[in-house]
Image (cartoon, helix red, strand yellow):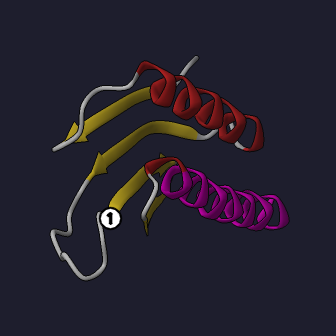
Amino acid sequence: MKPAVDVLYRDLDFSASLNEVITKKLEKLNRFSDQIMHSRVVLDTPHNHKHKGKQFRASIEIDIKGHPIAVTQDNESIHLAVRDAFNSAERKVKQITARQRTLQ
C-alpha cells in the first residue's frame, strides 16, 4: 500500500519537476520503513528580510506508526532546502526503524 502524500505550495508557484523530486525522495524513504502512513511536504517563503535575501523553507511531516517526524530546513534555494530536509528525515527514519528492530 502506498502512503498518502500531500505537497503544498505557499507563496510559490507549482513546479512539476520539484513534485517529481519530492515523490522520488518519498519513495526512497518508503524503502527504509514500511510503517509510513502519511507524508506532508510544505514549501514556502517565510522570510521577507531584505538583508538576508530570499529564503525558502521545506517542511516535512511523516507519520510513522507511533513516531511522528517533523523536519524543517531553510535555504536560499528551494531545491537545496528540499534536499537537506529529506536527508535529515532519512536519518530520523533510519534511527526509528533501527530502534524498532532492536525492540523486537
> Disc 1 designates what residue?
55
Vertical side of 35 occupied by 24: above or below: above
In the figure, is residue 98 to the left or right of 46? right
Q: Secondary structure at mark 1?
A: loop
Local crowd at mark 1 within 10 Å, few (<14), some, or many (≥20)? some
- Residue occupying the point 40% across, 52% down: 61
The C terminus appears in which quarter of the rendering? bottom right
Magenta-highlighted residues: 80-104
Which residue is rendered at x = 35% and y = 59% of the image? 57
x, y (%) of residue 33? Answer: 70, 43
Which residue is found at the position 67% from the left and 63% from the top?
96
Q: Main secondary structure of the magenta part?
A: helix
**25 left or right of 59 in image:** right
Direction from residue 1 to residue 3 in the image, left or right: left
The correct choice, above or below, for 55 with respect to 18 in the image is below
The quarter of the image holding the N terminus is: top right
- Residue 63 image offset from top left, x and y in percent: 45, 48
Residue type (three-letter) at the residue carrying disc 1: Gln
Q: Residue 28 falls in which quadrant of the image?
A: top right
> Residue at position x 64%, y 28% from top?
24
Asked whether 17 or 92 is in front, the reply is: 17
Image coordinates of residue 85 in percent, x first then y, are 54, 59
Q: Is residue 41 left or right of residue 31?
A: left
Question: Above or below — where is 1 with respect to 19?
Answer: above
Closest to the observer, 76 or 22: 76
- Relative to 91, residue 78 above or below: above
| Camera-side residue of 26 and 99 | 26
